[in-house]
């Protein structure tokens, strides 16, 4: 059995604080955002990270101060369903530490997520989710030939076109590859007017996850990089984390071949599934800003998957109402 070590980040009882070494935490984690490496990346960025574990699960969450107040917000992403004991410890922690609420966005199907509301009357469906409820998941247990046959006809055509135009894809999970990915990613963010994370966030996350989970794939035409993806592999599942592309040579369909090669990489790594990280629901409108990448992912024969809604474990009800109203006003202003 893996050893345990002491840390100052565990505050749930009066006993000496105990947490797990990397292998055991990752053994219990249900998603990359619950792994030791993800928590370490957040710490490096100055974010307070807290953890609680049971015999079978890990609950890693972050604390985010509300500016100009003595209060904070907790965020617990991509976990499993908590037990009554875990909920009590989280609630007690929040009471002691002036946490208004702890946002839960578990990595479970929507129907299972409904159990959260039944576990405690302190849970309420959040009005401002951080993760989309929907994602698309591709079953990688099929053969490569079957996966290719299951591509939408236009996607299959574009993959073959990119190959015909001599687009080449290679893995560059190193500093050079990261710099190319970062440039293409932020070019895309600027072009699409997307307010994403800072360059420091992305670099810290990559440097911390690189050796255990991270992969970067880049599509080239000659020596010119046209598209790049940052992927994570964890527990027999590969995840599309971030991507970027160039406006150069759009007619060679480099992103289409790049995604197909990402699928093949997942197969080589031993993944059973490919989680595309986020999507609109299958009834999406073509007018929605996310319609383009939802349709793009759909072209690879994925299954739309409805994940749990976002739930807030409310610790200070009256202040929570004030915060929620202020949040709505801020969103309208932005």
Image (cartoon, rainbow, N blue to C red):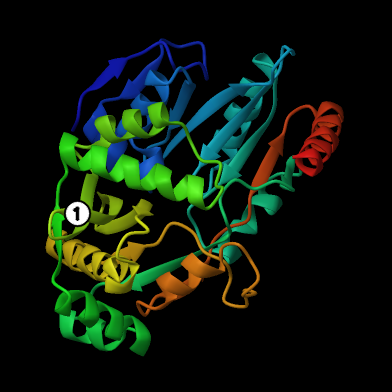
Query: Residue 259: image x %, image y %?
Result: 28, 66
Task: Residue 288: name its quadrant.
Answer: bottom right
Quadrant of image for the C terminus = top right
**Position above or below: 315 against 46:** below
Specify the quadrant that holds the N terminus.
top left
Is residue 283 found left or right of 181 in the rendered image? right
Q: Residue at x 59, y 66 (%)?
A: 111
Residue 187, percent across and down?
41, 46
Eyeballing the image, is 13 above or below 130?
above
Query: Within 10 Å of the Cα at label 1, are there few (<14), some (14-19), or many (20+) other Cα atoms?
Result: few
The residue furthest front is 248
Identify the residue at horizontal 31%, vertical 86% (top origin): 150
Residue closest to the eye, 276 or 158: 158
Q: Residue 319 sits in which quadrant?
A: top right
Camera-side residue: 79 or 222?
A: 222
Q: Nearer the viewer, residue 228 or 48?
A: 228
Mark yes or no: residue 142 visible.
Answer: no
Left or right of 94? Residue 303 is left
The residue that label 1 is drawn on is: 224
Q: Is residue 20 above or below residue 269?
A: above
Q: In the figure, residue 71 lies in which quadrant?
A: top right
Q: Give the mark count.
A: 1
- Local SS, label 1: strand
Q: Position of residue 87 (x, y in %)?
A: 60, 36
Residue 323 located left or right of residue 99: right
Q: Position of residue 139 (x, y in %)?
A: 31, 74
- Left or right side of 167 for 274: right
Residue drawn where x is 12% and y is 63% of the image: 268
Residue closer to the observer: 160 or 251: 251
The answer to whether 137 is drawn above or below residue 245 in the figure is: below
Whether residue 310 can be seen here: yes
Residue, x 27% and y 42% (percent of image)?
27
């Amino acid at each position: 059995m893996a050893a345990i070590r002491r840390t100052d980040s565990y505050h749930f009882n009066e006993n000496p604080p105990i947490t797990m070494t990397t292998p055991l935490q990752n053994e219990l984690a249900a998603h990359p955002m619950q792994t030791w490496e993800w928590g370490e990346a957040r710490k490096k960025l100055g974010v307070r990270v807290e953890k609680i574990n049971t015999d079978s699960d890990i609950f890693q969450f972050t604390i985010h101060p509300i500016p100009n107040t003595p209060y904070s917000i907790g965020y617990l992403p991509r976990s499993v369903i908590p037990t009554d004991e875990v909920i009590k410890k989280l609630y007690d922690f929040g009471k002691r530490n002036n946490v208004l609420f702890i946002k839960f966005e578990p990595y479970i199907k929507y129907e299972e997520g409904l159990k959260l509301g039944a576990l405690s009357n302190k849970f309420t469906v959040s009005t401002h989710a951080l993760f989309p409820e929907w994602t698309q998941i591709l079953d990688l247990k099929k053969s490569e030939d079957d996966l290719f046959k299951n591509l939408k006809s236009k996607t299959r055509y574009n993959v073959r076109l990119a190959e015909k135009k001599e687009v080449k894809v290679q893995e560059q999970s190193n500093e050079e590859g990261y710099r190319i990915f970062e440039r293409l990613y932020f070019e895309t963010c600027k072009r699409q007017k997307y307010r994403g994370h800072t360059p420091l966030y992305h670099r810290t996350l990559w440097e911390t996850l690189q050796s255990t989970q991270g992969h970067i794939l880049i599509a080239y035409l000659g020596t010119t990089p046209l598209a790049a993806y940052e992927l994570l592999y964890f527990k027999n599942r590969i995840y599309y984390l971030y991507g970027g592309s160039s406006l150069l040579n759009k007619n060679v369909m480099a992103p289409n071949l790049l995604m197909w090669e990402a699928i093949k990489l997942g197969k080589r790594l031993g993944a059973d599934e490919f989680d595309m990280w986020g999507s609109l629901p299958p009834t999406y409108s073509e007018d929605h800003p996310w319609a383009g990448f939802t349709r793009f992912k759909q072209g690879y024969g994925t299954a739309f998957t409805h994940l749990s809604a976002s739930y807030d474990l409310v610790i200070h009800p009256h202040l929570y109402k004030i915060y929620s109203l202020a949040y709505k006003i801020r969103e309208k202003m932005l």
